[in-house]
Image: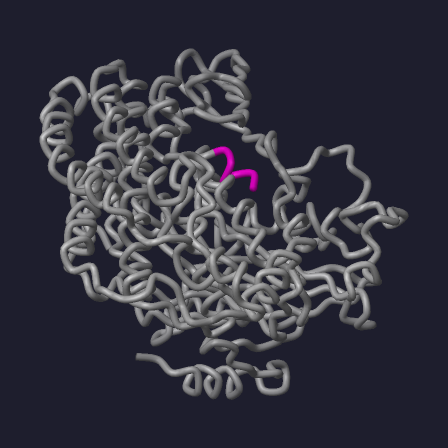
């Protein structure tokens, strides 16, 4: 827990605490289609001059009923729903879902597949944090950092393309492993990325980290104490910025995360600057993990020996009777899961991404609930922005990295 | 390191007959309690000197239309970050009396999770500061995640189970 407890927005606190000073309030609609909200959700702000007095949030504009749809879908078809949640880091969502089902069906995934997954998930985390921090720069009026980083994000997306054929909604991996091995082209692109990314990231950091204007703009803005953050169900970088070293990758390692050497960066005051810095530090840690995983990539198969769950290679489907049967059964969704329930969590771009699945023994889940980190921590937004200015509210929202797709599921 | 056994025994000692149906699916301690004891149990775990289970990971509902008197379940996933210990607490409710006390007094994060559960299942959280729909439109007059609302038109004939050998 943090030793220092900062008062949120101490710059303007006096005004917000003295209601007798509040004159006529202005109602201001922030959203639902305001570019600064980076997604479709609305905030009805009560403003006293430039100070926010209260905020009422409306969400659900892009609710797509994923939990309901999932109750009709065979297990492997649910992957496409998950990547539409946090679309800034879809591979984590996809692979998190596969790992939930593998744990549920007790499928042992070979090391090589686990390492490939780690590489992809860490790339996704880098991409996710790049967007968040790049946009934070844009919201404070510095456009160039965002453009530098987006070139690198493009390279990450090219690696996705090489691995799974898609860029945004990746549908990556299969139940039991990966859909294909890392190609030589993918490895070449990965190595190129590892080499070319650090200078750009360093340049970005030197533009922002100790930039006086940027620091004055975001230090002490939207601070939250560790205790409040935990009470609000914060996870991921936002919780770590408040000083709690909770990371699912370390606490409940999955997909061989215990093999890698990395640290959990934490902040102290939980303000916007700490969130920014924690994400920057995590990018470096993720890069370290990618390097290690690529360096020590084990030999062996990239999918589990579980023919009833893993789609057989096309070549075998045309030549072997068994493979053809399994292919048909899997594609038609005729694979029944055992009765039971499971909760499995992975460290998503925004925090603990959980899957709570209940099976009644059928071809589709009886009930599937997604624990979406940004849905849970976005409720803290009014508490964080009351008493600050409108421009601070934009920065706070930006640094929380609220993704509309994940918010509304 | 906390074991399931230890926590289960402690809860059994404290709550006696009000805690039952202990299970361990995939290593996660799962137990059921009554509606009256749900919040006291969460509070007990929250303030427990040793367990310190003060993080509400998840709160959601389930609909079992066929189990009479226990049609709805509210499921809490509580996490003790100090011991890295999770526990799943279930409370079953009857459709005729679909009320449960709110957990918002304990966890600020429960606010939206309870609203979401109300929105989709119609479970009423007594004492909730702002219990209204969150993801669906307010004019909606049904609770979409209940099982009586099938996803697809049941009159369709091109998707009969028999055609697929089911």
Left or right: where A298 falls relative to B96: left
Q: Quadrant of the N terminus of chain B?
A: bottom left
User: Residue A299: x, y in percent?
Assistant: 23, 64
- Residue drawn at (46%, 74%) of the image: A106
Q: Nearer the viewer, residue A177 or A82?
A: A177
Task: Let me know if residue A408 is in the magenta part.
Answer: yes
User: Residue A381: x, y in percent?
Assistant: 43, 34
The answer to whether residue A283 of the structure is visible from this angle is: yes
- Residue drawn at (58%, 59%) of the image: A75
- Residue drawn at (56%, 38%) of the image: A408
User: Residue B159: x, y in percent?
Assistant: 81, 52
Task: Count the labels in the image.
Answer: 0
Q: Nearer the viewer, residue A47 or A142?
A: A142
**Scheme by which the image is coloured:** one colour
Q: Quadrant of residue A76?
A: bottom right
Task: Let me know if residue A195 is in the magenta part.
Answer: no
Q: Is residue B142 above or below residue A246?
A: above
- Residue drawn at (69%, 48%) of the image: B120
Left or right: where A239 falls relative to B35: left
Magenta-colored segment: predominant secondary structure? helix
Per the rendered image, the range of residues in magenta is A404-409
Q: Quadrant of residue A338?
A: bottom right
Q: Quadrant of the C terminus of chain B?
A: bottom right
The answer to whether residue A228 of the structure is visible from this angle is: no
Left or right: where A149 falls relative to A181: left
Q: Nearer the viewer, residue A321 or A387?
A: A321
């Amino acid at each position: 827990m943090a030793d220092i407890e900062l008062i949120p927005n101490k710059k303007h606190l006096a005004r917000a605490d003295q209601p007798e000073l509040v004159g006529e309030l202005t109602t201001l609609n922030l959203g639902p289609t305001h570019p600064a909200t980076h997604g479709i959700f609305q905030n009805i702000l009560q403003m006293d001059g430039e100070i926010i007095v209260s905020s009422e949030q409306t969400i659900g504009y892009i609710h797509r009923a994923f939990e309901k749809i999932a109750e009709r879908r065979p297990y492997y078809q649910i992957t496409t729903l998950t990547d539409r949640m946090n679309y800034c880091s879809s591979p984590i969502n996809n692979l998190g879902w596969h790992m939930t089902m593998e744990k549920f069906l007790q499928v042992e995934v070979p090391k090589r597949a686990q390492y490939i997954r780690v590489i992809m998930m860490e790339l996704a985390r880098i991409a996710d944090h790049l967007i968040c921090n790049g946009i934070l720069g844009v919201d404070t009026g510095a456009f160039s950092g965002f453009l530098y980083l987006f070139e690198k994000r493009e390279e990450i997306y090219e690696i996705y393309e090489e691995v799974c054929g898609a860029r945004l909604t990746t549908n990556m991996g299969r139940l039991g492993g990966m859909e294909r091995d890392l190609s030589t082209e993918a490895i070449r692109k990965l190595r190129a990325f590892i080499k070319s990314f650090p200078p750009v990231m360093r340049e970005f950091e030197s533009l922002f980290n100790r930039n006086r204007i940027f620091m004055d703009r975001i230090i002490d803005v939207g601070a939250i104490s560790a205790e409040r953050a935990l009470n609000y169900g914060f996870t991921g970088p936002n919780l770590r910025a408040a000083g709690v070293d909770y990371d699912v990758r370390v606490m409940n390692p999955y997909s061989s995360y215990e093999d890698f050497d990395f640290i959990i960066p934490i902040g102290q005051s939980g303000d916007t600057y700490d969130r920014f810095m924690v994400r920057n530090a995590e990018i470096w840690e993720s890069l370290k993990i990618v390097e290690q995983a690529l360096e020590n990539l084990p030999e062996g198969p990239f999918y589990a020996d579980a023919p009833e769950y893993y789609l057989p290679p096309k070549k075998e489907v045309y030549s072997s009777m068994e493979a053809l049967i399994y292919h048909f059964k899997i594609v038609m969704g005729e694979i029944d899961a055992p009765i039971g329930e499971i909760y499995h969590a992975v460290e998503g771009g925004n925090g603990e991404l959980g899957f709570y699945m209940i099976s009644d023994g059928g071809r589709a889940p009886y009930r599937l609930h997604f624990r979406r980190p940004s849905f849970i921590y976005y409720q803290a937004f009014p508490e964080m922005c009351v008493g600050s200015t409108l421009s601070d509210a934009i920065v706070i929202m930006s640094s929380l990295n609220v993704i509309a797709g994940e918010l509304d599921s | 390191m906390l074991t399931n056994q230890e926590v289960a025994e402690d809860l059994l000692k404290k709550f006696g007959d009000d805690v039952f149906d202990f299970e361990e699916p995939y290593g996660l301690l799962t137990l059921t309690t009554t509606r009256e004891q749900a919040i006291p149990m969460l509070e007990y775990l929250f303030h427990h000197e040793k367990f310190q289970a003060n993080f509400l990971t998840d709160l959601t509902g389930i609909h079992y239309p066929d189990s009479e008197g226990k049609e709805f379940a509210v499921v809490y996933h509580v996490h003790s970050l100090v011991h890295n210990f999770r526990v799943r607490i279930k409370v079953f409710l009857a459709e005729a009396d679909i009320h449960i006390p709110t957990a918002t007094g304990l966890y600020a994060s429960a606010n939206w999770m309870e609203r979401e559960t109300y929105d989709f299942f119609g479970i009423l959280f007594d004492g909730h500061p702002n219990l209204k729909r969150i993801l669906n439109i307010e004019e909606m007059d049904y609770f979409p995640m209940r099982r009586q609302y099938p996803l697809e038109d049941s009159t369709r004939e091109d998707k009969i189970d028999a055609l697929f050998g089911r």
